[in-house]
Image (cartoon, helix red, strand yellow):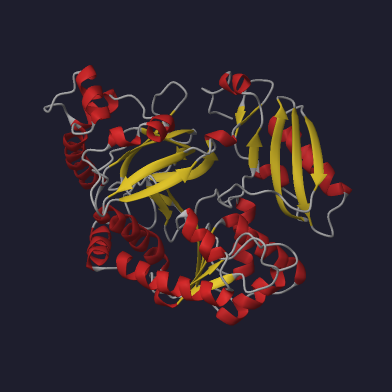
């Protein structure tokens, strides 16, 4: 919604909001799931068991198209001329000659990346990163349909479900005003067979209402932020209120920690099928039936680079760099998406698919912390090993040798839990000062995401370690 439309919607009575969501959902459904969507989803399924050689040939073909279109964009036209890139250059060879594309360039020069003037029907998605400055992502309608078909074919279908399955979404949409003091904190979209639930009202006061809603609605699928589902799951576990079993859970937008996965799957008695993508549309990975993260090669060429800009060996974390192969309107070539990941040592999977396998998406570059002995540390899951009496926690680095851990405790949280956290921190990051603080709430980002790790070190101190991705 635009700012004005959102203001009007949130200020409307609940009955009016429900009518708006139903009408919008009908329009959205028919725009999303037309013939193009079904054709594209079928194509993704048909390519699912291609060999690695077939995928490479497809990428080579798409790169040729991409470079041909990119020459029509002011930014790439100048870049190609400066580097002496010709029409006869080999596609993969050309790709590796090009510099990395930063988020700052996309943010400040987005229209210079366009291969043609914006036309009627062009979709513009505006996202705000950590700077708060909007980034404009331009889509053609066909590309938008593709962006919807890929999670259908390689996320929902891998769990034996479809976009018509009954769903509840715990995502970014502000379905009701922050000031609303009583349920319902959800709105229904009958055309989509979906309920949109607010993630901004998941406080202890209202969690019983959410559980009652889930008992009545009985969805087949839960979707959304892992942190939102973890909040409900922890409450249900502690209160002994078992929600109805669902067929599958689909998570996105945040890293799924091992603790969160175990808790969510235990409470709803099903499996999580996590997906990894981006609004920029240049990468898509999802978990198969055996839990492996398969990268869909048709969406983009994915590189994982070490601190020197070289390919990171399998098993070692590095920076994710993506080249989108489908968005010909606004090509993103060797785009620094801002994530850290690693290729799996074992690139074979019981499912038989020959798509590249990630061992996991470790997190965001901006979530890296640093130790006095020069190490970069990303994941803090092990810090909470053996601690079961917390609902959620956030690790904040204040100084090189000082961390604060904010804990949203359960009633059973005790001194032994604090000592366990402090001991685990020393095992994880060495001799640092650790302060554990119990709080009643942990702030979300503007888009409602939960950040498990925050680094508040000055930029000059981070820069000292920016090329070190190893733990």
Between 267 and 16, the one nearer to me in the picture: 16
Q: Quadrant of the C terminus?
A: top right
Q: Quadrant of the N terminus?
A: bottom left
Q: Quadrant of residue 452?
A: top right
Q: Residue at x 46, y 38 (%)?
A: 342
Q: What is the number of callouts on the image? A: 0
Q: Residue at x 40, y 60 (%)?
A: 155
Q: Position of residue 125 (x, y in %)?
A: 39, 49
Q: As drawn, which residue projects farthest toward the left? A: 88
Q: Residue at x 40, y 32 (%)?
A: 108
Q: Quadrant of residue 372?
A: top right
Q: Position of residue 103 (x, y in %)?
A: 43, 33
Between 198 and 293, the one nearer to me in the picture: 198
Is 345 left, or right, of 73 in this rendering? right
Q: As drawn, which residue projects farthest toward the right? A: 415
Tell me if residue 394 can be seen: yes
Q: Position of residue 29 (x, y in %)?
A: 35, 69
Q: Is residue 12 above or below residue 289?
A: below
Tell me if residue 278 can be seen: no
Between 403 and 442, the one nearer to me in the picture: 442
Q: Is residue 422 above or below residue 350?
A: above
Q: Position of residue 333 (x, y in %)?
A: 30, 34
């Amino acid at each position: 919604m635009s700012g004005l439309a959102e203001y009007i919607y949130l200020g409307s009575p609940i009955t009016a909001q429900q009518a708006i969501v139903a009408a919008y959902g009908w329009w959205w459904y028919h725009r999303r799931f037309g013939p193009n969507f079904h054709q594209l989803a079928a194509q993704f399924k048909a390519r699912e068991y291609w060999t690695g050689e077939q995928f490479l040939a497809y990428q080579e073909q798409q790169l040729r198209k991409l470079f041909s279109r990119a020459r029509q964009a002011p930014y790439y036209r100048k870049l190609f001329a400066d580097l002496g890139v010709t029409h006869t250059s080999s596609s993969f060879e050309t790709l590796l000659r090009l510099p990395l594309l930063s988020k700052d360039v996309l943010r400040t020069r987005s229209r210079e990346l366009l291969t043609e003037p914006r036309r009627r029907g062009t979709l513009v998605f505006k996202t705000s990163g950590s700077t708060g400055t909007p980034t404009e992502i331009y889509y053609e309608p066909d590309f938008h349909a593709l962006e919807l078909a890929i999670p259908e074919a390689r996320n929902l279908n891998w769990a034996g479900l479809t976009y018509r399955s009954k769903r509840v979404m715990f995502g970014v949409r502000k379905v009701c005003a922050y000031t609303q003091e009583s349920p319902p904190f959800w709105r229904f979209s009958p055309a989509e067979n979906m309920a949109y639930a607010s993630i901004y009202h998941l406080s202890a006061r209202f969690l019983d209402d959410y559980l009652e809603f889930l008992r009545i609605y009985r969805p087949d699928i839960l979707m959304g932020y892992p942190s939102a589902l973890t909040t409900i799951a922890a409450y249900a576990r502690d209160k002994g209120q078992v929600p109805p079993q669902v067929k599958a859970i689909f998570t996105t937008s945040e890293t799924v920690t091992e603790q969160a996965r175990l808790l969510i799957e235990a409470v709803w008695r099903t499996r999580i099928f996590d997906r990894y993508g981006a609004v920029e549309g240049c990468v898509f990975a999802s978990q198969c039936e055996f839990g492996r993260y398969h990268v869909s090669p048709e969406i983009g060429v994915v590189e994982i680079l070490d601190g020197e800009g070289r390919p990171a060996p399998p098993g070692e974390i590095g920076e994710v760099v993506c080249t989108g192969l489908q968005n010909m309107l606004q090509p993103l070539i060797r785009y620094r998406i801002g994530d850290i990941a690693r290729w799996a040592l074992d690139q074979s999977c019981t499912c038989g698919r020959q798509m590249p396998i990630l061992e996991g998406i470790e997190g965001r570059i901006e979530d890296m912390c640093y130790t006095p002995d020069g190490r970069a540390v990303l994941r803090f899951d092990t810090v909470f090993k053996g601690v079961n009496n917390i609902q959620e926690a956030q690790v904040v680095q204040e100084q090189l040798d000082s961390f604060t851990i904010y804990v949203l405790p359960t009633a059973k949280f005790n001194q032994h839990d604090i000592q366990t956290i402090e001991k685990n921190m020393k095992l994880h990051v060495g001799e640092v000062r650790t302060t554990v603080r119990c709080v009643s709430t942990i702030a979300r980002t503007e888009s409602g995401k939960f950040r498990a790790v925050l680094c508040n070190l000055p930029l000059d101190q981070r820069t000292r370690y920016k090329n070190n991705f190893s733990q």
